Amino acid sequence: MKQSEESELLLQPSVENHLLTQLCELQARFLRNHRSGGRMLPGGIDRLMRLDEVLGAIGVSESTIRRWEQKGHFPNRRQIGPRTVGWLQSEVENWIRKRGGAMRPGAH
């Protein structure tokens, strides 16, 4: 490769800085998502779990979840739409982790 061809391949400093900044932002977003176990959406937004996912994750009935919510023993649901609710995945996972796998609030 000739000297002139090599110099054409080099990026302008401003373009190089812009690309490096974008790469760093993507890497930071990836690391946040990876550390969160994949529960973060792009932009660092926590993922919402629907009722069927929550029921499957903790293995209790919907009425039990509702009762635990009312007593403050389980994370509160979030209203997504007029007839749709969800739970922040991070809150449900933290709730499970704090119990060490024990599902009943009074088990520990």
Image (cartoon, helix red, strand yellow):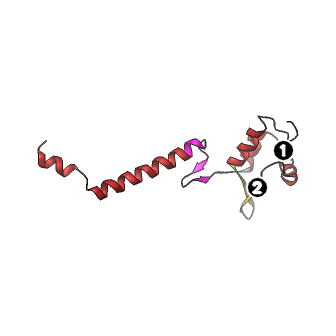
* SS at badge 2: loop
Residue 56 picture location, percent across and down: 74, 41
Residue at position x 51%, y 49% in the image: 29
Q: Mark 1 points at which residue?
A: 61
Residues under labels 1 and 2: Cα distance?
15 Å
Q: What element carries label 1?
A: loop
Whether residues under marks 1 and 2 lie with C-beta atoms below 8 angstroms apart, the answer is: no
Q: Is residue 56 above or below residue 13?
A: above
Q: In which quarter of the image is residue 37?
A: top right
Residue at 18 percent across and 52 percent down: it is: 8
Q: How many marks?
A: 2
Rendered image: mark on residue 77: 2
Q: Residue at x 85, y 42 (%)?
A: 105
Residue 54 or 23: which is nearer the viewer?
Answer: 23
Judged from this view, the residue extending furthest toward the bottom is: 82
Residues rendered magenta in the picture: 33-46
Please name the amino acid that badge 1 sits on.
Answer: Ser
Give the percent coordinates (x, y) of residue 40: 59, 49
Q: Is residue 85 left or right of residue 23?
A: right
The earlier-in-sequence mark between 1 and 2 is 1
- Between 50 and 18, which is closer to the camera in this rendering? 18
Callout 1 crowding tier (Cα within 10 Å): few <14, some 14–19, many ≥20: few
The quadrant of the rendering that contains the C terminus is top right
